[in-house]
Amino acid sequence: MKSFSLQLILVIISLSLIGQNSPKYASISGKIILNKEFYPDYIPQTIEITKQWPIDTAKYQYIIIDTSTMTFSGKIYLQEFSEFLVSFSTEVGKHIFPSYIVYSYTGIFGEGTNMTHKYVTLQEGKYLLNAHKIFLEPRDSLHIILDYNTDFKSYAGSVTYSGKCGFNNQFVGFDIKVNSFSDKSFKLSISEALSFEDKLLSEQKQLLLSINDTLSKNTYNKLLYDITFKSLVQKHALIRASLYTEKPNIIKNRQIARELYSFMDTLELKSEYLISKEFRSFLESYLEYINRIVTGLDSPESNLKNFDLSKTVFSGDILKYYLFNKIDFKLSNVSTYSSAIVDYNYFASNFPNTAEQNILTKKIEKRKSTLPNNIAPELAFKNHTNKNVKISDKKGSVVLISDYNFSVFEKNYKKLKILKNKFAKKGLQLVCTNASNHTAERKDTSIFNYIVDANKFLSNIESYNYKNSNAFYLIAKDGTIRLLSDKISEAEKLIPELLAEKYNMFTKAKSFFKLNSKLIFFALLGLVILMGILVLFKFFTQKKLINKQNQLKSELKAIRAQLNPHFLFNSLNSIQSFINNSDTEQANIYLSKFARLMRNLLEYSEKESITLKEEIDFITEYIELEALRHNFKFEINTDKQIDLYNTEIPGLLSQPFIENAIIHGIAGNVNGKIELNITRLTDKIRISIKDNGNGFDENHSSGFGLKSCRDRINLINSQKRQHIKLDIISNKKNGTEIILTIPEEL
């Protein structure tokens, strides 16, 4: 029994680990059936999947459609239960612009109230299969069949879902609309309407409960929250409509509101409700309810004021979502953009490093380039003859850019027409960024000189367009944005002033520097940094070189210090030899010469270089000194072309070689001879030290003097661009010749 329990525990742990390590994605596949009679030109190529909830910085995912079979498949990466919108496009990145129909109905709002309803989406004359809502969880697999073999006016066509989570989507999307509420309530009295809504909600809860076993837990909860808060929004709308008058009685309305809103008194707001779009929409209604029962005021226009109220009513993730949604809306509205920046600073300090903050930050950064006093970001235009120009080509003209939808706002079309007739000859150019709403077939297109090419500078187009309001930009002759407003009247006032401004070489230069200010700044900054690096490099290189030279000088002194005792040792041996032989006179002569030689040795040892004259005098005294002890002949020959008094060489460079020639070369040879020849070779001095001794094997020589001389020459060469060359020619027949080749400009 214990063994079985242990095995069961291990299996559970294994399954748990497998679940933890499972990939966080859902599979999606499907097929599109199109009736070419209704969609003759439309062949979708991509699927654009937009995440609606939870909020994420990863905005889009794309899946490619196999146009030969009209099938598709792919994976969507996600961490939790998520809501997506699926749209089918002929091109990735196309903008979607809805068309509308108008209808009316009767009820609390009164007879004949006009409302709008989106029924089909138009994009450059082609119908777009758009906005199918789906819900997915990690490891779901959803198969979609979209059958559009129906008249396009049915809008949605027939959509069938299958696979794991297929029933969730089939139920939520099409078969049973649990979030559907009737407009019948608006035809009833307020008490009857509230009771009717409660009845509808109860029926829908029962319906949802009956299929609970076929839905995932997350889907069930989401649908439950949807119908609950949809009902609350509906009841709130009924109360607001019943209380709304042009001259409200505040005290009476507050009392009535408190009675009617009794169903809200026990409501507890939980962050888990945010999974429901209906709850997210309900938050605005909740703030209006708080405002109404406290102040008694009807506040249908209080959305902006609710921003401050929300800080005291909401908290945690609910507050984060609400503030984000409001700021996002305000950033997409010209008139509220400035106040949105203030609100953003509050949001960033309270919800830093969140996906919501990152989204708002990107939107603000994108907007910065199109704020007044900036050079207008580049756009590509087309005129009515399809001639291509850019906004930078229009310098010298005043440009009015608009994204206004004139099919809805006819009065602004008339104002623009007046502006064009009045100022076109003076240099005013009208440009529309909303190209898809102003195609060549539209009558109002003719008012514009140019329409923006939506396929070029796409990110810049997005910076110009404000989603929740209309935007007018006035660009001066120097290319600077001088006005951003949602009111055409403000542009109308400024146009004459901008047209009167001069545009000459000075303003062109100013415009150039302003347009390229960042580039120039970073170029100058880079130049300063580069110069700084070069200065520092030179400083440290120079410092390193000085340290190296000081080190080499110390090493040269050390070598000379080693050579000097070597010379002293040999000289003292000679003096000792005279004393031992009782040759006092010779010893005194030798000692006198030795003293003078020692004085010069100490003096020259402190110098880096001495003149050739000083070198020859020292060598002469040294050879004469050694000649008292060793019987040999010597000659010193110098080139008459050499200026002995002004030509310098490293001090006592030749002495150790002459000493070696005497002691190791001709010592004991009655016919010994040493020759010192100094000649000029173009820009070099050649010193040759030749003896007629027995020679030596250079490769097997380990004498201290020769090694020290080589080390000294190597150290001198490491400091100089031109080098001293040492050559040794030695054999038993001809003796040894040491050749030093020293550059004059060492």
Image: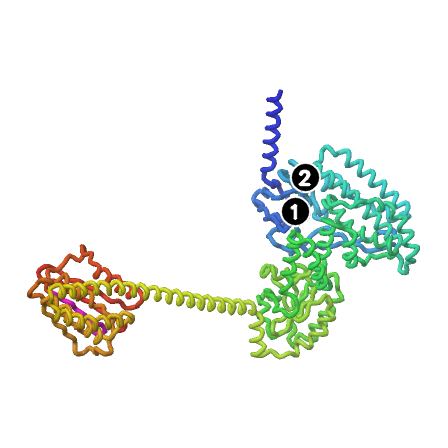
**78 over 10 or under it: above or below:** below
Q: Which mark is residue 160?
A: 2
Percent of width and height locating residue 681: 19, 73
Are the residues at dot 2 and dot 1 in contact (C-beta closer than 8 Å)? Answer: no
In the image, 674 versus 176, the foreground residue is 674
Q: Main secondary structure of the magenta part?
A: strand
Region in magenta? 682-691
Residue 15 among those drawn in magenta: no
In which quadrant of the rendered image does the N terminus lie?
top right
Percent of width and height locating residue 387: 58, 66
Residue at 90 percent across and 58 percent down: it is 248
Residue 689 among those drawn in magenta: yes
Residue on which disc 1 sits:
86
Left/right placement of residue 680 relative to residue 419 reads left
Q: CA distance from mark 2 to mark 1?
A: 14 Å
The secondary structure type at the circle numbered 2 is: strand
Name which residue type carries label 2. Answer: Thr
Dot placed on the residue nearer the N-terminal end, 2 or 1: 1
**37 over 171 or under it: above or below:** below
Percent of width and height locating residue 561: 27, 64
**Pointer 1 local density, CA inside 10 Å: few below 14, some 14–19, many at least 20:** some
**Pointer 2 local density, CA inside 10 Å: few below 14, some 14–19, many at least 20:** some
In the image, 736 versus 596, the foreground residue is 596
Left/right placement of residue 447 relative to residue 259 reads left
Left/right placement of residue 624 relative to residue 355 reads left
Determine the image quadrant of residue 98. Answer: bottom right
